[in-house]
Image (cartoon, helix red, strand yellow):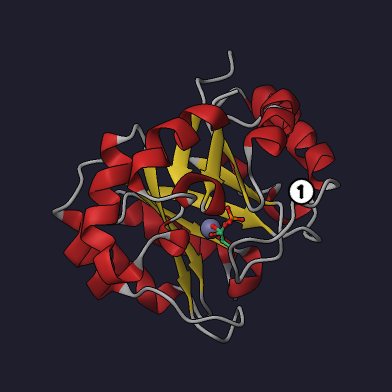
């Protein structure tokens, strides 16, 4: 299966939170493919960010796909609320369990795209038996919780291994990378086989007049 054209998903974690609607409109106009929303609970990860009410409020500011990255545990009780709020892809960490297969089925039951997120230390095997049900696999190239961290190089081998696994399966599963993505590391990720890139710092640097150039620079 040919690799898809790269999709860029700005992470609004690095946006101006006092003007989120305008920020989403600005990255949309600047060429973002998806809008990445980092949901953190101060429990699964040591930070507290965005809930379904904010996603609902942002929904009227863009028609682009909302790529919602759930860093919360327990995750299942929040899925219906994010679906209702307008999430398109819902991605979960296997560790946010307790039953990953059930969580994926819950997302699919709501007619949404299901993703699994692999932390830097989480092996491919964690999703081996659910991979065929997925629409997206997200490789964390930093430990989840904060923007602005350095890219962890060891994850390139994981991206390459996932590229092979997805191609062997023959299903159109998106292969996304999140954390420390900048024009240099973006190139490495694309070479390893990624076809979607999350970027916070690298997209929002310099304010709205830079967003189009920042996004373009990530396309390789
Ligand atoms: C980290 C988040 C990332 C983060 C990326 O837990 O999942 O989406 O916002 O930020 P940068 O691109 O600055 O590393
Ligand atoms: Zn994220």
The answer to whether the residue bearing label 1 lies less than 8 angstroms from the nearest atom of ligand 2 is: no
Residue 206 vertical placement versus 215 (above, below) = below
The image position of residue 17, as x and y in percent, is 34, 69
Observer-nearest of 119 and 123: 119
Rendering quadrant holding ligand 1 = bottom right
Badge 1: residue crowd in 10 Å (few <14, some 14–19, many ≥20) = some
Q: Is residue 160 visible?
A: yes
Q: In the visual, does 77 lie left or right of 25? A: right
Residue underneath mark 1: 124
Using the image as rendered, state which of residue 5 and residue 115 is in the foreground.
Answer: 5
Helix, strand, or loop for circle 1?
Answer: helix
- Viewer-side residue, 52 vs 25: 25
**Residue 69 falls left or right of residue 129:** left
Query: Does residue 7 appear to the left or right of 149 in the view shown?
Result: left
Quarter of the picture containing the C terminus is top right
Residue ID at (80%, 54%)? 123
Give the x, y percent position of residue 88. Answer: 32, 49
Could you tell me which residue is drawn at 51 percent across and 50 percent down?
Answer: 115
């Amino acid at each position: 299966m040919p690799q898809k054209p790269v999709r860029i998903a700005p992470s609004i974690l690095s946006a101006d939170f006092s003007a989120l609607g305008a920020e989403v409109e600005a990255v949309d106009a600047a060429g973002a493919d998806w809008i990445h929303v980092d949901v953190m609970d101060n429990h699964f990860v040591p930070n507290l960010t965005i809930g379904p009410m904010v996603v609902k409020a942002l929904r009227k500011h863009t028609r682009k796909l909302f790529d919602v990255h759930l860093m919360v545990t327990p995750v299942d009780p929040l899925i219906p609320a994010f679906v209702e709020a307008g999430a398109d892809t819902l991605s979960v960490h296997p560790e946010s369990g307790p039953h990953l297969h059930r969580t994926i089925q819950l997302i699919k039951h709501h007619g949404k795209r299901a993703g699994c997120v692999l932390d830097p230390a989480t092996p491919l095997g964690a999703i081996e038996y659910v991979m065929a049900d997925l629409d997206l696999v997200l490789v964390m190239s930093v430990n989840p919780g904060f923007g602005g961290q350095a890219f962890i190089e060891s994850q390139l081998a994981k991206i390459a291994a996932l590229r092979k696994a997805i191609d062997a399966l023959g299903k159109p599963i998106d292969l996304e990378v999140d954390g420390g993505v900048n024009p240099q590391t973006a190139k490495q990720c694309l070479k390893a086989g990624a076809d979607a890139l999350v970027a916070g710092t690298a997209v929002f640097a310099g304010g709205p007049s830079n967003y189009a150039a920042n996004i373009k620079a990530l396309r390789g």
